[in-house]
Image (cartoon, grey):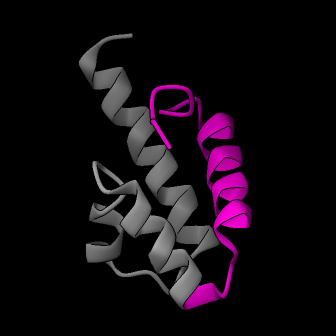
Amino acid sequence: MNKEQTEGKFEQLKGKMKETWGKLTDNDFTLYNGQREQFLGKLKEHYGLAKEDAEKKLKALEETSGCCGSDKAA
């Protein structure tokens, strides 16, 4: 997969995340790249999700978008 395809997949994932978690700000979404723990903390803060539940929901979105799922470390 080339860089443009990867970026396109990430944008699709970001769109799905915004649909799912509309309360999150663009700043919250920037945490997804490189600061995953803080991003999960934002999910917990805004939606009351347990870390495990947030991880499962995020992983499901990553897998359905074909982006980042197995490449991201927890």
- 61 sits to left or right of 40: right
Residue 28, given in percent of the width and then of the height, sits at 34, 74
Q: Residue at x 57, y 75 (%)?
A: 21
Above-or-below relation of 54 to 9:
below
Q: Nearer the viewer, residue 29 or 11?
A: 29
- 50 sits to left or right of 7: right
> Is residue 12 within the magenta segment?
no
Above-or-below relation of 2 to 46:
above
Residue 13, given in percent of the width and then of the height, sits at 50, 47
Residue 4, given in percent of the width and then of the height, sits at 27, 23
> Is residue 64 within the magenta segment?
yes
Residue 24, given in percent of the width and then of the height, sits at 44, 81
Q: Residue at x 53, y 81 (%)?
A: 22
Residue found farthest to the top: 1
Q: Nearer the viewer, residue 32 or 61?
A: 32
Above-or-below relation of 38 to 70:
below
Quadrant where the N terminus sits is top left
Q: Residue at x 46, y 78 (%)?
A: 42
Magenta segment, which residues?
Answer: 46-74
Figure disc tally: 0
- 12 sits to left or right of 3: right
Quadrant location of residue 70? Answer: top right
- 11 sits to left or right of 52: left
Q: Residue at x 42, y 61 (%)?
A: 37
Q: Nearer the viewer, residue 62 or 43?
A: 43
